[in-house]
C-alpha cells in the first residue's frame, strides 16, 4: 500500500511536470525569439538558447511603432476600465444579491443571456452609434461598450450572497445609509472577489484587439495589440520584433496577477459560501 501511494505520487508529479513544460514552452520560445534575428526564429532545429540580438530587435521595434505611446494608451484604457467597471459591476452585483425588487431574477437572467451573444454581432451597431456621437478614435469608444461586464456582475453577485444579511440589517438599525453600507461594509469584505474580477477585467481589456482596431483610426491612439499587428506587413514579418513586442505586452498582465494572486482563488471560490 505504501509503495502504491508513492508510485501514484510520482506519476502525479510527472504528469504535472509535463503539463508545466508544455504550458511554458511557447512562452519560453517567444522570449528566446525576442533575442534572435528574425531569420533564425523559424530555422530548424529551433534555437532554444537566448541570443544576443535583443537590443537590435528593440531598436527596430521602436522605429517600426511608437511602443511607449502604445503602452501608455493600453495602460490608461485598462486602468480606467478596471476601476470604472469594478464600481459599476460591484454595485450591480450588490443590488442583485441583497435587494428584493420586482424582476430581479428576470433582469439578472438577461445579463447571463447577454454573455451568450457573440461580441462580433454588436460591432456594427456600436460603430454606428459612436460614429453618430463623433466618438470614433477616442478612449471613450474603447471603454464604454464593455463597462457593464456580465461575467463580473455574476461573480460579484455570487460572492455578495455570502455576505450576512444580519450584518447589513444591524448597520441599517444603527442609522447607516445604503451608500455607507455599500462602500464601508460590503465592498471591504469583497476584496478577494474584487481582486479576482480585477484580474479578469485587466487581462480582457489589455488583450482587447478587435474593437480598438476598429474604432482607433490614428497611430497615436493605437493600443499595444493594435500597434503590434501593424508589424505584420504584406510581404514580410520581422518575427524578432514581433516576439519582443509580445513579450513586453505580457509583463503588465503577469505583474497584475502576481500582485493580486493571493486573493484570486478565494475570490473565485467565494461564491460557494452561503449564509
Image (cartoon, rainbow, N blue to C red):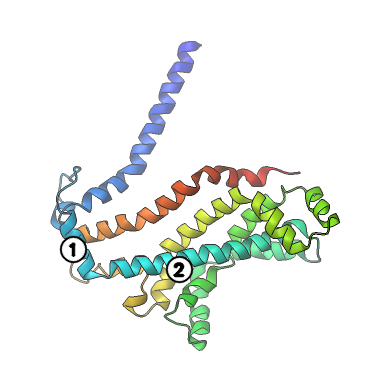
- Residue indicated by mark 1: 59
Looking at the image, is mark 1 or mark 2 earlier in the sequence? 1
Residue 66 in the image: above or below residue 108: below
Residue occupying image coordinates x 45% and y 52%: 256
Q: Is residue 214 visible?
A: yes
Residue at x 52% of width, y 86% of height: 133
Question: Left or right of 147: which side holds 210?
Answer: left
Would residue 112 appear left or right of 195 to someone viewing this image? right
In this view, which residue lies farthest toward the front?
174
| 46 left or right of 216 in image | left
Task: Rate crowding at label 1 as few (under 14), some (14 to 19) or many (20 or more) other CA atoms within 10 Å.
Answer: few
What is the C-alpha distance between the residues marked 1 and 2?
26 Å
Q: Secondary structure at mark 2?
A: helix
Q: Is residue 128 above or below residue 229?
A: below
- How far across and how far down the image is residue 37, in percent? 15, 56
Residue at 59 percent of width and 43 percent of height? 266
Q: Position of residue 241 (x, y in %)?
A: 22, 61
Residue 38 spot, x, y in % from top left: 16, 57
Label 2: few (<14), some (14–19) or many (≥20) C-alpha neighbours in 10 Å: some
Residue 132 versus residue 163 in the image, above or below:
below
* Res. 96 in view: no
Determine whether label 1 and label 2 are within 8 Å by CB. no
Q: Tell me where residue 274 sits by quadrant.
A: top right
- Name the foreground residue: 237 vs 212: 212
Q: Position of residue 275 (x, y in %)?
A: 76, 44
Per the image, the residue denoted by label 2 is 77
Label 1: state its secondary structure.
helix
Q: Is residue 2 above or below residue 54?
A: above
Callout count:
2
Q: Nearer the viewer, residue 228 or 232?
A: 228
Amino acid at each position: 500500500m505504501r509503495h502504491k501511494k508513492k508510485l501514484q505520487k510520482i506519476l502525479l508529479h510527472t504528469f504535472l511536470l509535463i503539463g508545466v513544460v508544455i504550458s511554458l514552452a511557447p512562452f519560453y520560445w517567444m522570449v528566446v525569439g525576442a533575442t534572435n534575428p528574425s531569420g533564425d526564429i523559424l530555422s530548424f532545429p529551433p534555437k532554444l538558447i537566448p541570443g544576443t540580438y535583443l537590443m537590435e530587435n528593440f531598436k527596430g521595434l521602436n522605429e517600426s511603432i511608437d511602443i511607449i505611446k502604445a503602452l501608455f494608451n493600453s495602460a490608461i484604457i485598462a486602468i480606467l476600465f478596471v476601476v470604472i467597471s469594478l464600481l459599476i459591476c460591484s454595485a450591480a452585483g450588490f443590488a442583485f444579491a441583497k435587494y428584493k425588487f420586482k424582476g430581479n431574477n428576470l433582469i439578472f437572467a438577461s445579463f447571463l443571456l447577454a454573455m451568450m451573444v457573440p461580441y462580433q454581432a454588436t460591432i456594427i451597431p456600436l460603430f454606428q452609434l459612436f460614429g453618430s456621437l463623433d466618438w470614433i478614435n477616442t478612449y471613450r469608444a474603447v471603454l464604454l461598450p464593455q463597462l457593464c461586464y456580465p461575467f463580473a456582475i455574476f461573480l460579484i453577485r455570487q460572492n455578495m450572497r455570502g455576505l450576512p444579511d444580519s450584518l447589513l440589517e444591524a448597520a441599517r438599525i444603527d442609522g447607516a445609509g445604503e451608500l455607507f453600507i455599500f462602500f464601508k461594509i460590503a465592498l471591504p469584505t469583497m476584496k478577494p472577489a474584487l481582486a479576482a474580477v480585477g484580474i479578469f477585467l485587466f487581462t480582457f481589456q489589455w488583450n482587447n484587439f478587435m474593437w480598438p482596431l476598429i474604432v482607433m483610426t490614428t497611430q497615436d491612439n493605437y493600443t499595444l495589440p493594435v500597434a503590434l499587428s501593424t508589424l505584420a506587413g504584406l510581404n514580410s514579418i520581422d518575427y524578432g520584433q514581433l516576439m519582443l513586442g509580445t513579450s513586453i505586452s505580457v509583463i503588465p498582465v503577469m505583474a497584475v496577477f502576481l500582485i493580486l494572486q493571493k486573493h484570486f482563488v478565494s475570490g473565485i471560490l467565494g461564491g460557494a459560501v452561503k449564509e
